[in-house]
Amino acid sequence: MKKHYFFKEKSTFRPLAKLLISITVFTMCQNNAVSQICGTSNITGSTSVMSKTSARTAKINGDEPIVINMYFNILNSGSTSTVTEQQCKDALVLLNNRYAPSHVVFRYNGYRNYYNNASATINSDNEFNQLRNINTNTASLQVFFVDGFNINGQTGIVGKAQLPGTFMALRKDARDTFVFAHEIGHNLNLFHTFHGQACEPDPNIPAELTNGTNCATAGDLVCDTPADPCMNQNNVNAACAYTGGGGFNPDTRNFMSYTTYACGNRFTNGQIDRLREALVLNNSLQTIQVAASQLAKPLKITSTRANYTRTPISGGCYEISYLETDKLEFQKGFNYTITVIHHPLNNTTTHNYTSAQTPLLNISSNSYNYTSKITTHTPNPTYSSSGNAGFVFYIDCPIYFPLMSANTTPVQSGEGSNIQPGLYLVPIHDEKKEEVIETPKVLIQND
């Protein structure tokens, strides 16, 4: 028997071009060396899309948060990991900041290390494609942090992504750079800004002209990204100006280009239209999305116990008491307002957190209800639930299970119990964890 007692305490919509291509794309080099390596491959034709309805069109055009589950997989060549769970969470804060204008938000949904893994360095396109078999959970966008790439001798590759799709790989040392946003952009159906040029030819999509007159059917299929002649880090200067000439004026700030790390900081409105349309209409991208309310849900709830006492009383029983506190941890990177109603006194507390803080809430109420609201997005993702903590007191009495006897009815000890002589099985409990830790046999004798 157990009882709890309270103890004080946007943009204009542009239709997506009809041709949607499933393609695997790699991205950028780590340093400012020329980035000429192009790993585009595996063109398979049109992707499956849902038909547009008024509701889906409104979602594409609107600012409603589209929330994507994200799971981090760390591939290690040895028996130790160089990327911690907290570093993954910190990288996710930066990623969400970069995607904030699109109102596409990424929700932390897990972290796992894989040791002595042969794919810690990805050596082929096929090995990359097999990553999806390492973690087969289809409810999240699977991010694989790897040591590096060596595909056809190309060791300068930093990232590679399925386009459009639900998995990608990124070199561990690039997790805080905009290349993370670049790779996710591929997952969400964005091409390189230089797509169709000589460095990334496509038999179905020509290069965009410098005057942009063919922008709807050429290049990256987005009209507010100017033609890009395969810009690289060697022809973008410290002021983020393009120095390559040739009549081109590419966007040196664009996430989907090969600009320098210091310059990449934005998607255009047209790119945002395109990636939101992919999320709303593309079948494969539906499985990794969750309701916006889940973004405001605690990442985890842990309980701690203090002042634990175990006092023997009559009948072989014990009085158990302790103070229990629930710790609620929410995802960092958003502004929160969290309201808690503490029972049975029904008093209310309100807690505000900024995006720079890690929202941690300690509650020691006998029972409580809470509502967490993220105020950095409109409409505000909101999650409500309840819990129990506070002062706990209960009587713990062993239960005797008869052995080698015609009477098989268990008998609980305590006052008034009638335990006959015989052999019994007596589970021994760890009351702190409330679990059986051993099952010794004892002989009970009555005088």
Image (cartoon, helix red, strand yellow):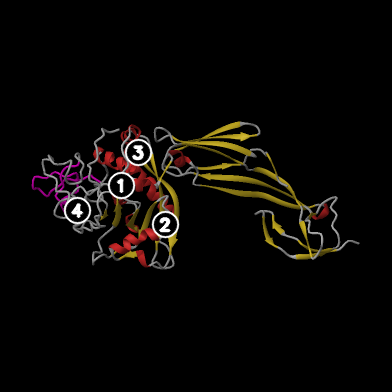
Q: State the residue position of label 1.
A: 48
Is 352 placed left or right of 118 in the picture? right
Q: State the residue position of label 3.
A: 103
Mark 2 and mark 4 lie on one chain; the one further toward the N terminus is 2
Find residue 290 and report its horizontal and vertical position in percent.
Answer: 43, 43
Mark 3 and mark 1 lie on one chain; the one further toward the N terminus is 1
Q: State the residue position of label 4.
A: 233
Q: Secondary structure at mark 4?
A: helix
Q: Give the CA distance from mark 3 to mark 2.
A: 27 Å
Task: Using the image as rendered, state which of residue 435 and residue 56 is in the foreground.
Answer: 56
Find residue 21 and report its horizontal and vertical position in percent.
Answer: 25, 50
Q: Amino acid at mark 2?
A: Thr
Find residue 419 and report its horizontal and vertical position in percent.
Answer: 84, 57
Asked if disc 3 and disc 1 are in contact, CB closer than 8 Å, the reply is no
Q: Give the CA distance from mark 2 to mark 4.
A: 36 Å
Q: Give the CA distance from mark 3 to mark 4.
A: 29 Å
Mark 1 and mark 2 lie on one chain; the one further toward the N terminus is 1
Task: Using the image as rendered, state which of residue 149 and residue 125 is in the foreground.
Answer: 125
Q: Amino acid at mark 4?
A: Gln
Tell me which segment is drawn in magenta: 225-254
